Image: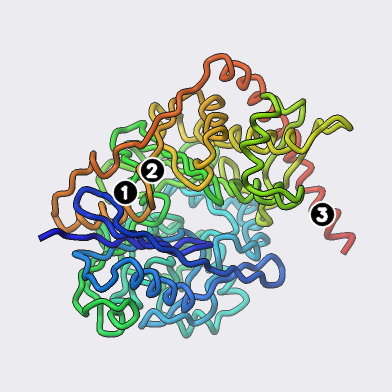
Amino acid sequence: MTRTWLGIDAGTSVVKAALFDDEGEALAVAGRPLELVHAADDGVEQDLDAIVAAIGDVTREVSAGQTPHVVAITGQGDGCWVTDEAGRAVRPALSWLDGRAGGILGRWNAEGVTERVFRVNGTTVFPGAPGPLLAWLDEHEPDVLDRATTAGACKDAVFTRLTGERATDPSDSSMPFGDGTGIGYSDTALEAMGLTHRRDLLAPITVPVPRGELSDAGAALLGLPAGTPISSGPFDFPACARGGGLRAIGDALLIVGTTLGCMVHVDRLATEGDPAGFSVATGEPGRWLRAMPAMVGTASMDWMLQTLGLGVDAIDAALATSAPGAGGVEVLPYFATSGERAPFVDPHASGQVTGVRLTTTRDDLLRAVCEGLAYAARHCFDAAGGATRIVACGGGTRSRPWLQVFADVLGVPLELARTPEVGARGAVLAAAAARGEDLDVETWTAPEDVVEPDPARHAFYADGYARYLDHVKAARPFWATRQASAAVAR
């Protein structure tokens, strides 16, 4: 009898589901858009009920009356999803894009809190991380936390809703509350963040991933039989690493998505040097993902396209028209409202476009964004310790000319991860491994293509990258003063 495996990815802007056969071939894929609600003071929230409903819709669409062998869930990381014992939202979730905890993070930076946390677990907190958001709620909405059972991750809230079980996996639990082992929480980190009294809101950690069965209520939500096996985790970044086939130390993943996800498979927890990035536990002893998940990504390109009144198809045309170097135009693509979190943390970070003249074209502006994001990726990989092999995935990889820019800047061949739904694919592989079931990982993760770097362009972009680093260094002191000036003006 042929088995099917259902992977579900509850992302930030869309929920997707993919039904795979035993060889990793996608039999059906479905998606539903999600809404982000922008609140006052840079708040960004999401409705858990809407996400659960979307999961039910895509599950019914791809399963088409079949019962999958296993349901495997992954989802967006960070943020703060405050729920009761049944997995129902006590308040709208605070997204990882939420910037309201920027003031708290500023105090923590000044007081050395962020560095103390990094020395424990290799994680640099940013405004949308669980620690600052939980502290913001504790300061502004303590009654909400008093009524809650869990303050955790998106996928874990969904898992509780579908199974009635409260649990998280090593990946989400390792940042920023982890104790550096991948399987426990740190008293030191919680004390530093002033959150010891909220420790009971952290879900128990299950290694390698939580497993359960659909409850009657969960079965009704998904349209599947009660008792269907279901797992939760890892969250989307490490799930993509697994789905992309990262296995050896030095293997790396580049996610060209809403954000730019850069991570390298390492064999030790990095807590030395200047705090930067995240260290994500894999659930395997001596195996970590050193992650530099920048806030920049295709969202920066989307903003430029919208500003210029262009569609996404304009990217390839621009790269064919504008030569490398973009006619002297250079971009720092830090357009996110909450600043930047990797390879440095700065809630005041903002974008820059320099070198613009009357002869500058729209194509030059688009190429400059493409090159700026590629430089940002190299900055992240350099901070993570470098990479010997890079697998690429995400919506931005659909543009082969843009992927060529990434390859030329990085100077490493880019293997295109097997599609569709790399994160959902990784969640299934994690579920199968946790159950002791044998899937052919090499077949499931075989790359679809390889983009080779051009040596001459790599040499050209080396100079551009050096200028990029100089621009970042020069801009950082002005970001904070710009923010202070804006506050005075208000």
Answer yes or no: do the residues labelled 1 and 3 have beta carbons within 8 Å? no
Q: Which residue is mark 3?
A: 484
For this view, does 437 lie left or right of residue 55? Answer: left
Residue 240 locus on image (x, y percent):
38, 48
Kindly report which numbered mark, 1 or 3, lies closer to the viewer in this rendering: 1
Q: Secondary structure at mark 2?
A: strand
Q: What label sits on residue 137 in the rendered view?
A: none
Classify 10 Å Cα crowding around label 1: few (below 14), some (14-19), many (20 and above): many
Q: Secondary structure at mark 3?
A: helix
Distance from disc 3 to disc 2, alpha carbons, whole Å, reads 36 Å
Q: Earlier in the sequence, mark 3 or mark 2?
A: 2
Residue 113 locus on image (x, y percent):
56, 54
Looking at the image, is 361 positioned above or below residue 422? above
Distance from disc 1 to disc 3, alpha carbons, whole Å, reads 40 Å
Whether residue 231 appears in this view of the structure is: yes
Kindly report which numbered mark, 3 or 2, lies closer to the viewer in this rendering: 2
Answer yes or no: do the residues labelled 3 and 2 have beta carbons within 8 Å? no
Looking at the image, is 277 positioned above or below residue 2? above
Q: What label sits on residue 282 in the rendered view?
A: 1
Q: Earlier in the sequence, mark 1 or mark 2?
A: 1
- Of residues 392 and 321, the one nearer the viewer is 321
Residue 312 locus on image (x, y percent):
63, 47
Whether residue 184 appears in this view of the structure is: no
- Quadrant where the C terminus is found in the figure: bottom right
* Amino acid type assigned to the residue bearing label 2 in the image: Leu
Residue occupying image coordinates x 25% and y 49%: 24
Q: Which residue is mark 2?
A: 289
Q: Earlier in the sequence, mark 1 or mark 3?
A: 1
